[in-house]
């Protein structure tokens, strides 16, 4: 079941990508696909961190619901830090700063 939980994060992220492409009127192109690959990688790694931490807590005797809540509270800051660092690093690909940057727009 742990694998299903981790794999379920990718389609949920893809729904968000499709929605944001529609809202912003952007097309699905190479830059968008690169962003999707990065999104899937980050979301799967975050899910692995959460599931692993919750399983460790369950092995120590904690009830499942409490283990999930503790995992979410404990791992939130590292997940946000990773996500914000990735967004900051990729922001230059998504924003049009100079003439000639049009090819980098998603």
Image (spheres, rainbow, N blue to C red):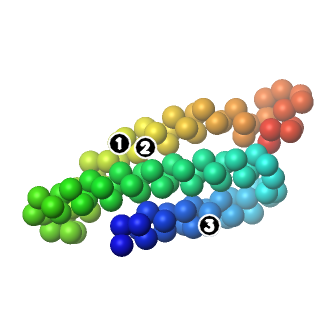
Residue 56 shown left or right of residue 37 in the figure: left
Earlier-in-chain disc, 3 versus 2: 3
86 or 26: nearer the viewer: 86
Residue 23 in view: no
Residue 93 visible within the image: yes
Residue at coordinates 72% horizontally, 36% vertically from top-left? 93
Q: Nearer the viewer, residue 96 or 65?
A: 65
Secondary structure of the residue carrying tag 2 is helix
Tell me if residue 92 comes above or below residue 15 in the rendering.
Answer: above
Give the left or right position of residue 7, taking residue 75 as reference: right
Residue 27, given in percent of the width and then of the height, sits at 82, 57
* Image quadrant containing the N terminus: bottom left
Instruction: Using a 10 Å C-alpha cutoff, classify the residue at mark 3 as few (fewer than 14 neighbours), some (14 to 19) or many (20 or more).
Output: few
Residue drawn at 48 percent across, 65 percent down = 7
Q: Residue furthest top?
A: 98
Residues marked 3 and 1 touching at CB (< 8 Å): no
Q: CA distance from mark 2 to mark 1?
A: 5 Å
Q: Which residue is mark 1?
A: 77
Nearest to the observer: residue 40 or residue 79:
40
Q: Residue at x 55, y 62 (%)?
A: 10
With 16 as the anchor, is 28 left or right in this view? Answer: right
Q: Residue 64, how many percent across, how many down?
A: 20, 69
Disc 2 designates what residue? 80
Residue 62, x across and y down, in percent: 13, 63
Q: Contact (CB < 8 A) between labels 2 and 1?
A: yes
């Amino acid at each position: 079941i742990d694998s299903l939980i981790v794999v379920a994060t990718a389609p949920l992220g893809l729904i968000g990508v499709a929605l944001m492409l529609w809202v912003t009127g952007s097309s699905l192109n190479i830059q968008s696909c690169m962003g999707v690959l990065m999104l899937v990688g980050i979301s799967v790694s975050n899910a692995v961190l959460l599931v692993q931490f919750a399983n460790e807590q369950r092995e120590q005797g904690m009830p499942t619901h409490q283990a999930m809540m503790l995992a979410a509270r404990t791992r939130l800051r590292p997940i946000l830090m990773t996500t914000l660092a990735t967004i900051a690093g990729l922001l230059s690909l998504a924003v049009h700063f100079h003439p000639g940057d049009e090819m980098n727009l998603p």
